[in-house]
Image (spheres, grey):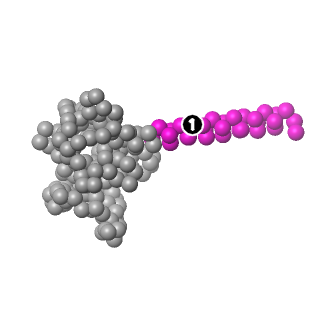
């Protein structure tokens, strides 16, 4: 093997190793965000720390560890997939959560059960008297996640239908609306 070939393959090995190291680090950080270890009680006031995605946030209560909250009743499109028409709506949901959540403290209303299978806290978050999830549904930025029924599901579904009829948010784009409807049909088949 000549020096040029050896140098080429050495560079390839170094680049692959660096990519694997970086990828593992990103996965580990993301898992850490999904399993923030703190504990919340019904009615707690919390502060938004970070938005993980359009339906999951990390919050903190004074004097305790951060808590990952999966917002009850909604599902946002994935925002990280490039060149996917729905990613823009995932990012818009994240931006709206930041905008609403950073305005002041959030009140937590826990679900029953209070945790999902990933260990995240399931809750409704209120900014003043405004339900964050309902606001996102009304703006057409997220879908109502109907696989697991929740107390305000009818209210959320009505808001989703109004957003659809008014062509707000994702409902303004025919292709995205079709993908949303496909997801909703799939969720109907998944109901326990």
- Residue 109: x %, y % from top left: 20, 46
Q: In this view, does 114 lie to the left or right of 23?
A: left
Question: Could you tell me which residue is drawn at 20 percent across and 44 percent down?
Answer: 42
Question: Could you tell me which residue is drawn at 34 percent across and 42 percent down?
Answer: 68
Image height of 103 relative to 72, above or below: above
Q: Image quadrant of residue 7? A: top right
Question: Could you tell me which residue is drawn at 66 percent across and 40 percent down?
Answer: 16
Quick one: 50 or 162, which is closer to the camera? 50
- Residue 191: x %, y % from top left: 31, 68
- Please rate how many residues cluster around mark 1, counting C-alpha atoms within 10 Å: few if below 14, some from 14 to 19, many from 20: few
In the rendered structure, which segment of residues is drawn in magenta?
Answer: 1-30
* Residue 13 lies in the magenta-colored region: yes
Q: Is residue 8 left or right of residue 16?
A: right
Give the residue number, with chain letter if any, for mark 1.
Answer: 22
Quick one: 188 or 60, which is closer to the camera? 60
Question: Could you tell me which residue is drawn at 31 percent across and 47 percent down?
Answer: 121
- Residue 189: x %, y % from top left: 33, 71
Q: Is residue 95 left or right of residue 85?
A: left
Q: Image quadrant of residue 3? A: top right
**Please, which residue is most extreme toward the bottom here?**
189
Please say whether residue 127 is visible from this viewpoint.
yes
* Residue 121 lies in the magenta-colored region: no
User: Chief secondary structure of the magenta span?
Assistant: helix
At mark 1, the secondary structure is: helix
Image height of 176 relative to 133, above or below: below
Please say whether residue 90 is visible from this viewpoint.
no
Image height of 143 relative to 36, above or below: below
């Amino acid at each position: 093997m000549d020096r040029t070939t050896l140098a080429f393959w050495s560079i390839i090995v170094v680049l692959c190793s660096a990519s694997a190291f970086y990828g593992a680090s990103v996965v580990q950080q993301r898992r850490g965000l999904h399993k923030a270890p703190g504990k919340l009680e019904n009615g707690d006031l919390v502060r938004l720390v970070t938005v993980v995605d359009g339906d999951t946030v990390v919050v903190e209560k004074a004097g305790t560890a951060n808590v990952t909250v999966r917002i009850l009743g909604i599902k946002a499109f994935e925002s990280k997939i490039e060149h996917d028409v729905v990613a823009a709506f995932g990012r818009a949901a994240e931006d709206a959560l930041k905008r609403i959540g950073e305005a002041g403290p959030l009140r937590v209303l826990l679900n029953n059960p209070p945790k999902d299978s990933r260990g995240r806290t399931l809750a409704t978050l209120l900014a003043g008297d405004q339900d964050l999830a309902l606001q996102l549904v009304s703006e057409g930025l997220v879908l109502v996640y109907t696989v697991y029924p929740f107390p305000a599901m009818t209210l959320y579904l009505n808001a989703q239908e109004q957003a659809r009829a008014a062509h707000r948010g994702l409902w303004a784009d025919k292709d995205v609306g079709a993908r949303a409807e496909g997801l909703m049909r799939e969720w109907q088949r998944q109901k326990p």
